Image: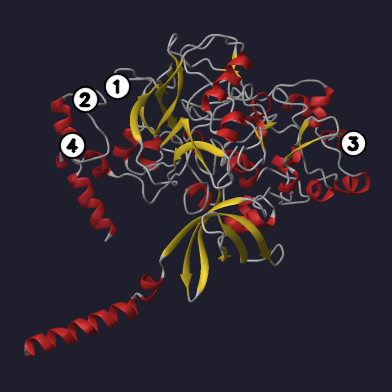
Amino acid sequence: MLLVAGSAAQAKEHPGRAYIEKNGYDGPSSCEAQGCHPGSARKFLETVHWKHASPADNVDGTEPGREYGMKNRIYTMCNGNDLVNDLKEIPPNPKTGKTKFTGCNTCHPGNHISDVGSTGKEAENAVDCLVCHSAAYDYRLRKPFKDEAGRIVMGQDRSVKAAAAVGRPGVKNCMVCHEAAGGGVLVKRGFSFTRETDVHAANRMVCVDCHGAKDHRIPTGYDPNNWANDGVRVACADCHGEAPHKDEDTNRHTARIACQTCHIPRTGGALAKDFTKWTQGTDGFYEPTTLRMEANETAPVYAWYNRTVANTPTFIGPKGSRADKASRIHPFKMYEGKAYFDRKTGQLLSMDFAPPMATGDTLAGVASAAKTLGIREYDPVPGWQTIYFGSNHLVTKKKALSCANCHAGNGVLNFRALGYSEEETRRLTSAEIYFDKMADRQKEEW
Amino acid sequence: MKRFALASILFAVAVAAAGFIFPSAASAEEIKLIGVITEIEIAGPDATTATATLKDNKTGDLVTVIVNDDLTLDKFKDHRIVVGDEIRLKYEINDGKNVSKYFRKTAGC
């Protein structure tokens, strides 16, 4: 069942199979042959998946009109970005003499010759349609190599077999990149999308059932740390409405409590990372020292969020308050990252991973990134940054928070910290407000 | 003395019963390792089980595990996980066989 849900949906055969079998598959030009999918590749170049950036109007300190994203952002989950940590062959490890390819843009759906944000006909032809749309993609072929000219090229599976299995993206098409973000499986966002961990997956839904694209513009939520967006948004209420419960008292909560607060009671992924001290693996290469947690292994932090984002060198997270009627209480994955800051400006410095990956020399990584960015003077000093990631997956119905999970004296919500007075908190954390309802429910259930 | 004997018998019965009721609890010790895959054996696209052999990074020993979970099997089938990948592995020994409980690539982006 999982395999069915996890593969590109192929309810019926995709038209054009005979053409592909006769002529072979040559990338977007094959997809656009015979009048099919006209202009798709050109339009795709305008999306976040290709540009890794977009305007970020809801984030403090960003410049209007400028685009932000994985292409150029600096924060302590990914201390590099596409610019400073471009896909490359790292220097040989002194102990083993071995090298390897690494870079933030390894997930970019081009061929690296046509890279993040590139435009024109060559870029259109470089789009790897099948990595997202084929249920039979051979991922062995999607790895970097050096071509005859010495350029680093990202391989693609353009076989007839892969092209013949084209369809809507399945879970694995999305997760092959999204589950490995941040330096390992489930490190960054810390959610898996399986029948065991998410009620939508258990109901055989796939990512694009909620994140349904138009012209390859993918709707996203308002994760405070996920700034780049295609200008289209998705929310639970799009399907479930604002009053999805049978019980009216529960429905009243939705005005100030986000669905995720009760229905995503746990989070996971990396708890903290240290980019100033990398750990050497038995293969001789180094990785940022990372405290890993499983999906559903950690408790979220709860905060008011009005969908605007605080962005300072030491904190990236939600803005909002009880007094702000646009705010609702949301759960967040709290993360702390240690990296180098410039003592003079207080700004976070970015890192090219190639030097520290080979030798563990993190300051050499900072120096390489500074050179790429044209920063001549800086004084690196270690420091911490806290990030609140949106917690929007790992949805549960059965294990959703119930009255007492929040309103008992030892409930998960810190009402005082959320802006409630001592008297209000005393009232909100008394069994008086939920006792009769829970007693009735208990009677019904048993 | 009689009371002690009776208590001993009851204790022995309780221990035996616990072993009968929870036979796997005693044998299912979880073992962890990080190692590189040297071999994957899977019988075609419809296979519901596979074996993978890893070389333990610490000891250099080869460890072969049975993999039954759908997600990892799917990753074997479409080569998202291949020979040469470094894996974080947890496994249990059930009836003398190593059964994978956690099979994750260490590498990310």
Locate residue A259, reporting x and y percent: 40, 36
Quarter of the image where one finds residue A420 = top left
Give the CA distance from mark 4 to mark 3: 65 Å
- Residue ID for mark 1: A322
Q: Quadrant of the N terminus of chain A?
A: bottom right
Residue wearing tag 4: A429
Which is more N-terminal, label 2 or label 3?
Answer: 3
- List the residue tagged with mark 3: A34
Task: Tell me if mark 4 has few (under 14), some (14-19) or many (20+) residues whose alpha carbon lies within 10 angstroms of its own.
Answer: many
Do the residues at discs 2 and 1 belong to one chain? Answer: yes
Identify the element where label 1 is drawn.
loop
Callouts 2 and 4 close, C-beta under 8 Å? no
Position of residue A146 measured from the top left corner of the image (x, y, whole percent): 79, 35
Decide: is A335 above or below A369.
below
Residue at the image position 89 percent from the left and 36 percent from the top: A34
Amino acid type, residue under disc 1 in the picture: Arg
